[in-house]
Image: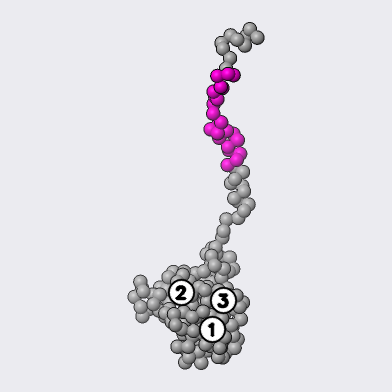
Amino acid sequence: MPRNFWMITCNEENFKITRGLQFASQGLKSQHRRKVQRVEVGDRVLFYVTGIRRFTATATVTASYEDDSDSPWQKEGNTGWPYRIGIKPEFVLDEPQYIQAGLLAHRLDYVRRWPPENWYMAFQGNLHLLPKNDFFIIEEEMKKMRLGSAYRYQPPTPTKAKSRSRKRRAGGNRAGQASREPASVAKPASEQVAPGQAARS
């Protein structure tokens, strides 16, 4: 069983770097050294992306921290990422599935010290120790997104789009035809026939 449940916060660019590394490792910031030292193999990790305020992924720690002098993560403000832990992905959402943290904040014990309208202030900083129940509330919502529940993002399928296009074209051929073509088109004066002329010819 995991001993600790952590939340790592980072901006969107740094989260994309972690995704690019296939969630094999994650950098941690220098001001959280004491917390970093508590991260153990088997602990669980939740990702929260600042700016967009979304929960995006969970992972499991596979290696405790080590110094990282060549960190690929970009500084956020003046703070770098001098430590690195090994991780493996558990639930990773596609971008349209990212969960709005504000929708779950009222269910989390961790944010109750802040006014409801300022829930996001609970997520300032890079590394947070979460209550186990909070972690599982969020991860359960991720499971719903990944496993096809009613909450899962479902883009329109090409088949339905084509079907609607055919109906519009079919309707246009029957009822819309007249609206696209004028009822009568005036001919140039040189082509007009005087009354009775066609009968004589």
**Helix, strand, or loop for circle 1?**
strand
**Left or right placement of residue 15 versus residue 198 in this view:** left
> Which mark, residue 27?
1
- Could you tell me if the residues under marks 2 and 3 are in contact, i.e. CB atoms within 8 Å? no
Quarter residue 199 falls in = top right
For residue 86, say whether it is visible: yes
Q: What residue type is labelled 3?
A: Ile
Residue 68 placement, left or right of 30 = right
Q: Which of marks 3 and 1 is nearer the N terminus?
A: 3
Name the outermost residue toward the top.
200
Question: Neighbour class for label 2 at 10 Å: few (<14), some, many (≥20)?
Answer: some
Residue in the image at 37% along x and 78% along y: 112
Which residues are the magenta region? 168-191
Indicate the quadrant containing the N terminus: top left, top right, bottom left or bottom right. Answer: bottom right
Provide the secondary structure element on which disc 3 rests.
helix
Residue 179, position as x, y percentages in the image:
53, 32
Residue 21 is drawn in which quadrant?
bottom right
**Amino acid at circle 2:** Thr
116 relative to 21 in the view: left or right:
left
Residue 2 visible in the displayed image? no
Task: Compute the Cα span from label 2 to label 3.
Answer: 15 Å
Residue in the picture at 65% in, 9% down: 201
Residue 122, compared with residue 38, is above or below; it is above
Q: Residue 17 carries which label?
A: 3
Determine the residue located farthest toward the front in the rendered image: 190
For badge 1, the amino acid type reads: Gly
Residue at left 48%, top 88%? 30
| Numbered disc in front, either 2 or 3 | 3
The residue beneath circle 2 is 50
